[in-house]
Image (cartoon, coloured by chain):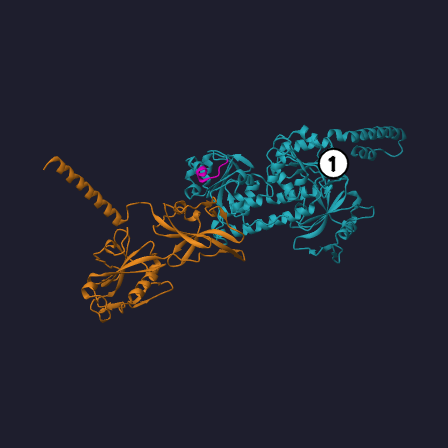
Chain colours: A orange, B cyan
Amino acid sequence: MDKKMITAIAVIGVMVITGGAYVAMAMTGTESSVPTAGVMMYTDGTYVELEGAGDTVREVLEDALVRGGHTLEMLSNGNISAVDGSAAGPEEAWTLFQWLPKTGWKLITIGSAADASLESGTTYCINMSSVTTVEGKTTYSLPYEEPTAVCWFYIVFKADYDAVSVLGIYTESERRSGFWISGEGSNVAYAFKDACSKTGFDLNMQESGDLLGWLNSFLGLEDVKVPGSLWQYWSQFHWDGDSWEYNDFTMGYYDPGVNGYFALVRQTTEENNANAGIFVTPEDCPGWSS
Amino acid sequence: MPAYLSLRRTVPVGHRDTMRSVQIKYVVSASIAVLILASLPAVGLTTASADDNQGMMIDFGYWNTVWIDMSFSDDMDGYSALETACHIKGYDIIYLDDGSVYSIDGQTNLTGISWALYSIRGSEWMLEADPSEVKATGHSLLCWARSSGEEAVMPGTDSTGYSYYNYAVKGVSLQSGEKLRVVSLAPSVTETLCSVSGIDYIIGTDLYSNYPEKISELKENGHISVVGGYTDPNYEWIIKICPDVVFCDGGTGEHVSIADKLRKSGINCVVLYDCKDIETLYSNIWITASSIGFSENANSVIYGLRKTMDVVSGISGDIGKRVFVSLSADPSPWTSGSDTFMTDVLSSVGGYNVFSSQSSSWFMVSKEQIYAKQPDVIIIISSSPFADLEGYQSIIDGIDPVWKETPAFRNGEVYVFSESAGDILSRPGPRLSEAAEILAKILNQEAFASFDPLDTVPKYLGDDYQEYLSYQAALL
């Protein structure tokens, strides 16, 4: 083996190692420690969609507006005084909202949110609100659009793969190895509903209230109590950038902009001790993007 | 003439020789008295010409007072003087069966608060037990007040015992018949004058008066002269611009001294009371407005301030946070003790000045004392202007390590006031209601945010502080 060959092997080796490291970083979502967030900005009667990066809400906003070629002026308390040099008119105010998937738009102030940890994928909205004061209480009108995002769902059967109600869904082999579906919505429950609507899958889901996204039945399969204090049901997981994590809340509490990959596993498991054992990652998903 | 009266009482009747010598003594005494009286203006023991004017105050209580310019006739007693005054103003009077006053203009007696006649003795009000026995012409000023006693009646004189009425009517000098010419010797006094529509009459101020903004403009273009600093007003400059009235701050010894000197030179002075609480501010507003002939404006301004104070203190509630107010970020700075407007304003919005137990008004404290008090909130009044987060952070970073061992620092409750925001915390004028609102929001942000989620104050305030005011009532 001559020197050139050794050098080439070494270079390729470095490239492979570097590439592998990059892929690993991408898979874990740690290629950049700076979170990004979506910013909807009201302008000329409509909303433009921007994206910014930063560790705080203030940084994200400033970055998003700079990238979009806009200017933002704030008071010392973080309230927005002008956007693109335009101040609010009488009975109006520039306002900042944060999208919460379960409850919708929440009015926030930079002062209160600036130091809060910023979750990547959250959507903010710089809105021109009309101001109403009744009996001393002031309210600000909400943005009239809701942010939506696409969410992917990995459906896999570890049990009930031969149930009558699912026989028409792919093949048994595909049901047992799992498959992906996707939908769009302002929270994961609505995105799942959209996905089922597109695929024609049977869904009976709680669509409002505290249990928004609770699955009464999916593909005709309900929660079934089995002997030994066990349940056969759709256990649900979300991808946290590193691994599948059991959902502590119903799907309505999740923002598809923040958590874009979910797994629904039909299985029998002990209560409060669900073990995913899911052998795919979002990288296997047709809609995967780092 | 106490000496003369004493002499007469000691002369036995029938002792003609003695009497003759007494008469000689009397003539000599009288001559000396005349000389003394003639020389009084030169030695500064006279009162201003306005003291000869007569009138009546009707004090309805709750900082609502009316001045009636009127002459007392020989046949007037306390009741007939009131009836004349009420006739002038169109007020109804209702008497009780015992002849006492029950209501004036519909304002009735209340529990522990009743209508009574007061007259001035020196600079103090004295209750007249029987108004029918009061000979009105013996007084320059009478006051019918609905109050709990003398202490609760609107002051009838300035802080040095001089009458303040009738220097002017609607801004026209009663002495010259021309537009009033006024000098203010302190920023808080200037702001008080301006709040009652006095800005058009100001011809001179101290160096530091800069609010409202028009004051600065008028100083820059020469329409208002600078007559010295706050503690060193210049007598010659004041004399030179020929004011009708000079307004002084009674909390400053130099002002009391120069008022005495100016009065010797025939210039009327009004020395406002040392403003140690909000109620004294209301009195000063009344005195100031009445001095320039706009007493009705005082009621409006006081009403607006009281309304604001009531609202912001009502929202903040009695939150009881312990507050340390520092006049700088030095390790051992000046702070306010008891009997200061700062302590009163903090108290009115539910806070507690950690040094309010100190008998001194403004004094220096050591960092160890600050640590011992463990304040929940620290307010720093900075003389260095800054307008951004970087400037604030620089001050916070430079804070003495001992200060950092307080709940205020640990919880991020350190606020810095500079420029105009610093002024509202250091000037006991009508902008105290603005200071109260800002302080109330600092002490109980949650309460204010429950009414308006965007109604928050930042950690540092400067010339933009008015952006954070939302409860200020109109004053005029």
Which chain's residue wears label 1?
A: B
Q: In the image, is residue A42 above or below residue B458?
A: below
Which residue occupies the foreground of this view, A39 or B10? A39
Is B388 covered by the magenta stretch? yes
Q: Residues within 10 Å of mark 1 (few under 14, many from 20)?
A: some
Pick the front one: B188 or B372: B188
Q: Is residue A200 visible?
A: yes
Decide if residue B261 is in sight here.
Answer: no
x and y, in percent, of residue A130 in the image: 50, 55
Residue most extreme to the left: A1
Provide residue B168's location: percent of width, then percent of height: 73, 41
Does A251 sit left or right of B474 as displayed?
left
Q: Which residues are magenta?
A: B385-392
> x and y percent of residue A92 in the render?
51, 53
Left or right: B4 in relation to B220: right
The amino acid pointed to by label 1 is Ala
For the residue pair B300 and A130, the one nearer the viewer reads as A130
On-image quarter of the N terminus of chain B: top right
Asked whether B353 or A275 is in front, the reply is A275
